[in-house]
Amino acid sequence: MVADPVNNVIRRFLVGPIGQEITGVVTTPDQKTMFINVQHPGATTTAEDFAQGGLVSHWPHDGALYPRSATVVISREDGGVIGS
């Protein structure tokens, strides 16, 4: 969630895959690029389901055998400041 301190509007900015945590949110000094980390996607899979190949996530690629942590780069299509 992101909050605008001027008008107090709150909006959803980012949603991660099942069973993960978003970490390491940082922007470049010009605030035009944001980096986030997706850690432990599919971590809610039980040991029994994992042993049988029943994973709850295949992020970042559908059909991949195991989910993987990753760094994601976010920028605006128009090259502007994120959040403006």
Image (cartoon, grey):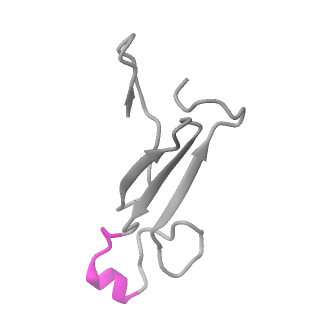
Q: Residue furthest right?
A: 78
Q: Is residue 66 above or below residue 70?
A: below
Res 59 visible: yes
User: Residue 10 location in percent, x, y?
Assistant: 38, 23
Q: Residue furthest front?
A: 29
Q: Considering the image in quadrants, where does the N terminus appear?
A: top left
Looking at the picture, tell me which residue is in the foreground, 66 or 76.
76
Q: Residue at x 59, y 30 (%)?
A: 81
Res 17 visible: no
Q: Is residue 78 above or below residue 34?
A: above
Q: Residue at x 35, y 83 (%)?
A: 50
Q: Residue furthest top?
A: 7
Q: Residue at x 39, y 11 (%)?
A: 6
User: Residue 63 location in percent, x, y?
Assistant: 59, 75
Q: Residue at x 38, y 64 (%)?
A: 39
Image quadrant in which you'd find residue 61: bottom right
Q: Is residue 29 above or below residue 22?
A: above
Looking at the picture, tell me which residue is in the foreground, 59 or 55.
59
Report the number of discs: 0
Is residue 48 within the magenta segment? yes
Q: Residue furthest bottom?
A: 51
Part of the protein shown in magenta: 43-52
User: Residue 40 location in percent, x, y?
Assistant: 36, 68
User: Residue 29 location in percent, x, y?
Assistant: 51, 39
Q: Considering the image in quadrants, where does the C terminus appear?
A: top right
Image quadrant in which you'd find residue 22: bottom left
Looking at the picture, tell me which residue is in the foreground, 42 or 83.
83
Q: Is residue 31 above or below residue 74?
A: above
